[in-house]
Image (spheres, rainbow, N blue to C red):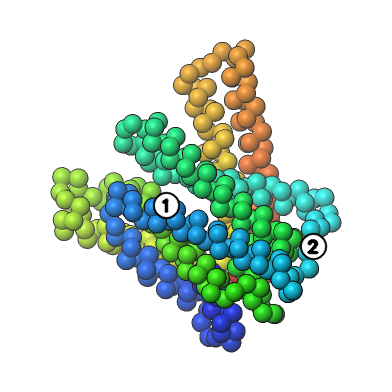
Amino acid sequence: MSWKIMYSSISPHGSLKLYEFIAMVTVVMIVLSQLPTFHSLRHINLCSLLLSLGYTLLVVGACIHAGTSKNAPPRDYSLEPKKSARAFSAFTSISILAAIFGNGILPEIQATLAPPATGKMVKGLIMCYIVIFLTFYSAAVSGYWVFGSKSNSNILKSLLPDDGPSLAPTWVLGLAVIFVLLQLFAIGLVYSQVAYEIMEKKSADVKQGMFSKRNLIPRLILRTIYMIFCGFMAAMLPFFGDINGVVGAIGFIPLDFVLPMLLYNMTYKPKKSSLTYWVNMSIMVVFTGAGIMGAFSSVRKLVLDANKFKLFGSDIVD
């Protein structure tokens, strides 16, 4: 999407469509997906961290430049007029935040397959949450400061408006696009590994080497099909923000806030009269309600936005 935004800014009448950029990215991902294990991604993970910090620094700098320039856009911090709309937006936002902070749990769950699990998970999650907090919140706060409620979910689109000049130096935004593109390659590789592990439990033969013909050919076929499917769905349904909300409400809120409390009570069996038991029960009830409301509001927004797009269209549904 960022690639398409930059292309549209440089060549407003260009013929390339969004799905064509997604197809290019999918081809690269098919090649990179052949890295066989999490261990082979350790250097890519480090690069991903540096790219996240670099992208955030560039975006924050661009927002400060835009907000203090003579072309600074008018700021509007008003909320939606209807209380119901504000409530739905709030629960959708909670679901998106759950997806952002919760997705770090997936590779950490897989890390429990190799002992010592506790140490690895705690260190990994602490690092994950620190990076998420620094990157997401600094970009969100600076973007909201400049554009207010008119800020686009992809801040680069706000900094590169369709009906005016760029609000930040082009080279800064171009470098930010390169950073976010490389970062998305890394993210795709890391989180696809979970799906690969599930698929290859039955297709792989652990008695043979990972680069043997017996394991290499099935891995090549399965991962290629998986990436083509992901690219096809992304090109067909450009609901990136909306889908984040649905996944957060249905997947990550139960995974992060309900299931751990339930498993703790089932495993350690605290007394029903104890504070621990009732704190866990309260968290389960509150976040079950938040998940239900978040799912409803996210699906509602998805349905409302369905009127704004065409299959394999070139416009992003914000």
Residue in view at x 66 percent, y 58 percent: 142
Identify which amino acid the numbered label 2 is placed on. Answer: Asp
Mark 1 or 2, nearer chain start: 2
Would you say the residues marked 1 and 2 are in contact, meaning their CB atoms lie under 8 Å apart? no
Q: Is residue 149 above or below residue 268?
A: below
Can you give x and y, in whole percent of width and height, for residue 220 in the image? Answer: 27, 61
Can you give x and y, in whole percent of width and height, for residue 80 in the image? Answer: 80, 57
Give neighbour class at mark 1: few <14, some 14-19, many 20+ (Cα, 10 Å): some
Q: Is residue 130 above or below residue 298?
A: above
Considering the numbered disc 2 on the image, is that residue within a helix, a strand or a loop? loop
- Viewer-proximal residue, 307 or 231? 231
Number of numbered discs on residues: 2
- Viewer-proximal residue, 306 or 279? 279
Can you give x and y, in whole percent of width and height, for residue 289 in the image? Answer: 67, 37
Residue marked by disc 1: 191
Residue marked by disc 2: 76
State left or right for residue 17 relative to residue 306: left
Residue in view at x 15 percent, y 56 percent: 212
Identify which amino acid the numbered label 1 is placed on. Answer: Tyr
Can you give x and y, in whole percent of width and height, for residue 39 in the image? Answer: 30, 48
Corner quadrant of residue 285: top right
Question: Which residue appears farthest toward the right when viewing the image?
Answer: 81
State left or right for residue 201 relative to residue 188: left
Considering the numbered disc 1 on the image, is that residue within a helix, a strand or a loop? helix
Corner quadrant of residue 222: bottom left
Residue in view at x 63 percent, y 36 percent: 287
Residue in view at x 82 percent, y 50 percent: 83
In front of the other: label 1 or label 2? 2
Which labelled disc corresponds to residue 73?
none
Corner quadrant of residue 8: bottom right
